[in-house]
């Protein structure tokens, strides 16, 4: 077997590993699960398949459109990042670095999944952007939700399903497009700063995960 790579964590997975250890463990159950999956991938060369949901698919397809929509809202042209970067512990691909601020955009499925009334950022996304700040050296973060139209192919698919079921086809398109919504209701933003204590603890957690991995190797 070829030499295994050093375990690193994708920024999008940070939220899965940072819970406190319980039951006499050295790391959390989520962190143990992460290590086991990583180890299986390393020794077999087989990767787990990413789960694809309509919401995730929409976010991926509309990524560029959402980015340029934000440029219009902010009245400035940002430079979109398209490269994955990594350090000794983490890897990830953020959307944009604007000076000392990292920007990441999320595209909710519909108006009812926009966090309009939340006062604190989603914990998993907060962790993800802390990772991006660790990778880039940024001091600040903007977590931005943008309410974007669903891709035309997804709308048409939903319309066909509605027609087959005898439902209101016109309502499908109306609920999946948002050009009739004021811009201020198509955006929800959270701003927060880099937490060096969290990043330090995160690196210590990854060190502990690497140590745990050695206990699983025959």
Image (cartoon, rainbow, N blue to C red):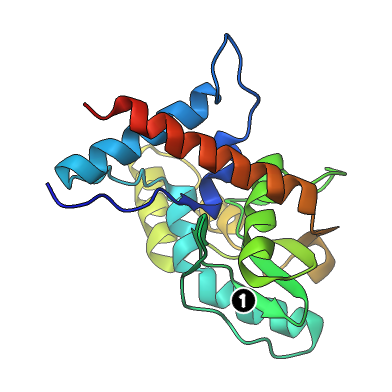
Image spot of residue 71 (x, y percent): 71, 83
Q: Quarter holding the C terminus?
A: top left
Residue that appears at 29% across and 38% down: 39
Left or right position of 84 against 19: left
Residue 178: tell me if it is visible.
Answer: no
Residue that appears at 41% across and 58% down: 154
Nearer the observer, 25 or 170: 25
Image spot of residue 182 (x, y percent): 80, 68
Image spot of residue 108 (x, y percent): 61, 53
Left or right position of 158 against 120: left
Residue that appears at 58% across and 82% down: 80
Nearer the observer, 123 or 72: 123
Q: Is residue 7 above or below residue 36?
A: below
Q: Which of the 4 image quadrants contains residue 81?
A: bottom right
Residue 40: tell me if it is visible.
Answer: yes
Residue furthest out toward the left: 1
Nearer the observer, 75 or 48: 48
Q: Which residue is mark 1?
A: 67
């Amino acid at each position: 077997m070829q030499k295994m790579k050093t375990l690193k964590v994708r920024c999008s997975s940070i939220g899965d590993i940072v819970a406190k250890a319980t039951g006499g463990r050295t790391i959390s159950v989520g962190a143990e699960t992460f290590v086991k999956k990583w180890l299986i991938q390393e020794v077999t060369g087989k990767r787990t398949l990413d789960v694809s949901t309509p919401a995730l698919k929409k976010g991926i397809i509309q990524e560029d459109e959402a980015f340029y929509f934000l440029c219009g809202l902010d009245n400035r042209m940002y430079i979109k990042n398209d490269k994955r970067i990594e350090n000794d512990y983490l890897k990830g691909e953020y959307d944009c670095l604007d000076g000392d601020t990292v920007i990441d955009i999320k595209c909710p499925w519909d108006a009812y999944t926009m966090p309009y009334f939340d006062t604190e950022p989603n914990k998993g996304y907060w962790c993800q952007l802390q990772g991006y700040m660790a990778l880039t050296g940024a001091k600040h973060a903007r977590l931005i939700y943008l309410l974007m139209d669903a891709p035309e192919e997804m709308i048409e698919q939903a319309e066909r399903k509605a027609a087959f079921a005898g439902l209101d086809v016109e309502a499908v398109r109306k609920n999946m497009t948002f050009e009739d919504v004021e811009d201020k209701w198509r955006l929800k933003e959270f701003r927060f700063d880099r937490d060096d204590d969290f990043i330090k603890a995160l690196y210590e957690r990854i060190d502990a995960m690497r140590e745990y991995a050695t206990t699983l190797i025959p």
